Image: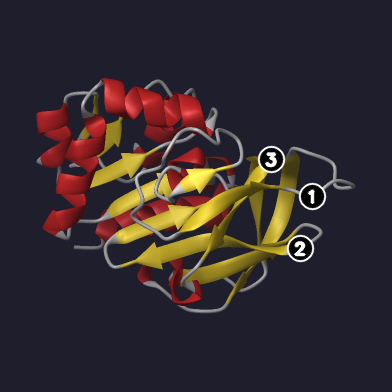
Amino acid sequence: MITILDYGASNIGSVFNAFKRFVDRILITSDPDLVARSDKLVVPGVGSFGDCVRKLRKNGLEEALLEFIKTGKPLLGICVGLHVFLEESEEAPRVKGLGVLKGRVLRFPRGLKVPHMGWNTVRIINRCDLLRHVKDEEFFYFVHSYYAKLEEEKFIVGVTNYGLDFPSVIKKDNIYLFQFHPEKSYIPGLKILENFCKIL
């Protein structure tokens, strides 16, 4: 069963509908106990870093997420659902992230139109199981004004250029993080979600 974490992100419906193509059992929940005991967990993301992290902490979901990660079961994070796993963000300087990944979330530099919105390519630099049957330099749909800057580049799987190269796919152990929105990225995005449903 796929569990979608409900912490107030506005793209839960589109994520749910995309996964319905591949699985019959999908749970949307904000219950920390159910999150920690999930088989596979999805952290959607539309909103600000500070707001998302505060909601996770207020509802007891930070600890549930960290407990889930320890189980080794697959976790998929999307957009802000990627950012919250880093240590901090320029979007909310006083709010600490979950710190699962060492690094910061930075705003795109002046001179670039923000948000970075629309279709852009992903250059695959390290293969992972969720990118199986996904072509290099495939187009995906992005909507974001901030990007991840990792201290440990070995976890970067895919890179996108928008004035600078930034990580658009990150994998650390059982954690798969995407800066773009697979649920809005048509066939290649749906292939990623299908692959997530199939991994053990």
Q: Mark 1 points at which residue?
A: 109
Tag shown at residue 164: 2
Secondary structure of the residue carrying tag 3 is loop
Measured in 3D between alpha carbons, the distance from the residue under mark 1 to the one under mark 2, in whole angstroms, is: 9 Å
Please tell me in which quadrant of the rendered image residue 173 appears. bottom left
Please tell me in which quadrant of the rendered image residue 63 appears. top left
Q: Position of residue 48 (x, y in %)?
A: 54, 29
Is residue 134 visible to the viewer in this orientation of the structure? Answer: no
Measured in 3D between alpha carbons, the distance from the residue under mark 2 to the one under mark 3, in whole angstroms, is: 13 Å
Secondary structure of the residue carrying tag 1 is loop
Q: Comparing marks 3 and 1, which lies closer to the viewer?
A: 1
Secondary structure of the residue carrying tag 2 is loop
Q: Where is residue 130 in the image (x, y as percent from the top left)?
A: 40, 64
| Amino acid type at mark 3 | Ser
> What residue is drawn where x is 48% and y is 45%?
88
User: Given contact means CB atoms under 8 Å apart, are the residues at marks 1 and 2 in contact?
Assistant: yes
| Amino acid type at mark 1 | Pro
Task: Mark 2: give few (<14), some (14-19) or many (20+) Cα within 10 Å.
Answer: few
| Amino acid type at mark 2 | Leu
Q: Name the residue under label 3.
A: 145
Q: Which residue lies furthest to the right in this view?
A: 111
- Relative depth, front residue between 90 and 134: 90
For residue 181, above or below residue 138: above
Q: Earlier in the sequence, mark 1 or mark 2?
A: 1
> What residue is drawn where x is 30% and y is 32%?
5
Q: Comparing marks 1 and 2, which lies closer to the viewer?
A: 1
User: Given contact means CB atoms under 8 Å apart, are the residues at marks 3 and 1 in contact?
Assistant: no
Is residue 66 visible to the viewer in this orientation of the structure? Answer: yes
Task: Mark 1: give few (<14), some (14-19) or many (20+) Cα within 10 Å.
Answer: few
